[in-house]
Amino acid sequence: MWQKKDVTLDEEFRQKLEKNEDGWRLVRLDADVNLGGTKHRLQKFLRSMAFQCFVIVFVLLNAVINASFVYRHDNSDKIRKRYYYFIEVGFTVLFNLECLIKILCYGFRNFLRRGIFKFEMILCIGSSLNAIKYFYDRNYFTYFQAFRLLRLIKASPILEDFVWKIFSPGKKLGGLVIFTITFVIIASAISLQLFYAIPNLPYFHTFPQAFMSMFQIITQEGWTDFVVEVLRATDDKLVPFVAIYFVAYHLFVTLIVLSLFVAVILDNLEMDEELKKVKQLRAREATTSMRSTLPWRLRVFEKFPTRPQMAAMRRVDSEFPMPKVRDSFAHQFALEGVDSEMYDQEGDCTKTVLQLAASRRFCQEEPHFRHVGSVSLKTSIANLLE
């Protein structure tokens, strides 16, 4: 339940490669590199699964206790709220102690490098202000108690990964929200100009009232009753046009605008799946390339000893175009060494052909065939290296 395959890293979270007695390993920058025994044990305890479960249990317990508070609107509310105040102070002290221990173990700079630690520190500051009796009675900082539940999202990697997939591309969702608000503002302005002169219709007297009325149609909460009241207040000749106007607005908002939010969320999930497929294909290609065997013309170099003084490269390999030569050609048409007489004969043959061009008589020589064995291959390679 609490495991996942993909590891999401926080912002500015870095690792470095270090060598110790056991070999090379990746070490986090906020890890216990040069710490004493007490801090080392405390860090191990803070990273343990038992401590994480301990924190999750207390966060859930705090949420259940806050949700169990009941207002009866009598004198018993003050007594009940006093008990809940002391309970909240106890939870605040506990979470502040956790934050203080983390600061002492990791250091203040390393503590601020982690996003989750910053969030916990903000919760501790807000909860500490809420623990003051003056602010607790007026509920100024009560929201920080509810925000503690967000720590459960970070504690569960599966839930954290799912939330990150949905809300990580803020440009798409933000642009869609801006488009929806702009569309409602335009529709509210048009409706205000159309229906502000109708008497006994309080929905379009001011722009805020018109905005709330058009937003009510988006929420689909009693929008039919609202439209019926508008139709009753308008002229009988204009009732069909008014009905078409509100029905068209409702269809556009429910079928297009709200569907865009679902489409954006699904697109974000599909993008993550496509990235996974690309990573899998790259890993598969890398594995296949490592396991592929070399061609026969390159396997001979595997037999050479790994000594760098065997050859001196003056140019890049790409400057040496190498044609493809099959083994059958090497066995049948390879010649031993360079025969100067043959080239002389070929030159004479060329001259003869030019001189006897009128009669179309060509110089023909018998082809030379030979079979190349292992000794000949070694000799040819030695000549190439020389």
Image: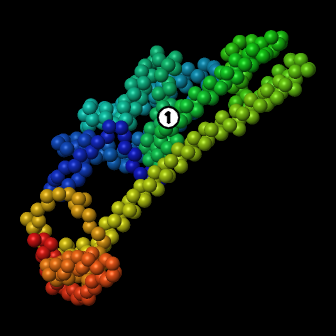
Where in the figure is residue 271, as x and y percent of width and height? 50, 47
Q: Residue at x 66, y 34 (%)?
A: 257
Q: Quadrant of residue 51?
A: top left
Where in the figure is residue 226, as x and y percent of width and height? 79, 24
Relative to 379, is 7 above or below?
A: above
Relative to 62, is 228 above or below?
A: above
Local crowd size for mark 1, using a 10 Å CA cut-off: few (<14), some (14–19), many (≥20)? few
Near-viewer residue (278 or 215): 278
- Residue 85 visible somewhere in the drawing: yes
Secondary structure of residue under mark 1: helix
Relative to 135, is 286 above or below?
A: below
Task: Determine whether, in the image, residue 316 is placed left or right of residue 2.
Answer: left
The residue carrying mark 1 is 170
**Quadrant (top left/top right/bottom left/bottom right) for the C terminus:** bottom left
Where in the figure is residue 320, as x and y percent of width and height? 23, 62
Near-viewer residue (196 or 241): 241
Task: Determine whether, in the image, residue 339 is placed left or right of residue 290.
Answer: left
Q: Quadrant of residue 366?
A: bottom left
Where in the figure is residue 356, as x and y percent of width and height? 28, 79
Q: Residue at x 65, y 26 (%)?
A: 183
Near-viewer residue (351 or 255): 351
Q: Quadrant of residue 350?
A: bottom left
Q: How many marks?
A: 1
Q: Residue at x 63, y 29 (%)?
A: 180
Say what amino acid the circle numbered 1 marks.
Gly
Q: Residue furthest front?
A: 358
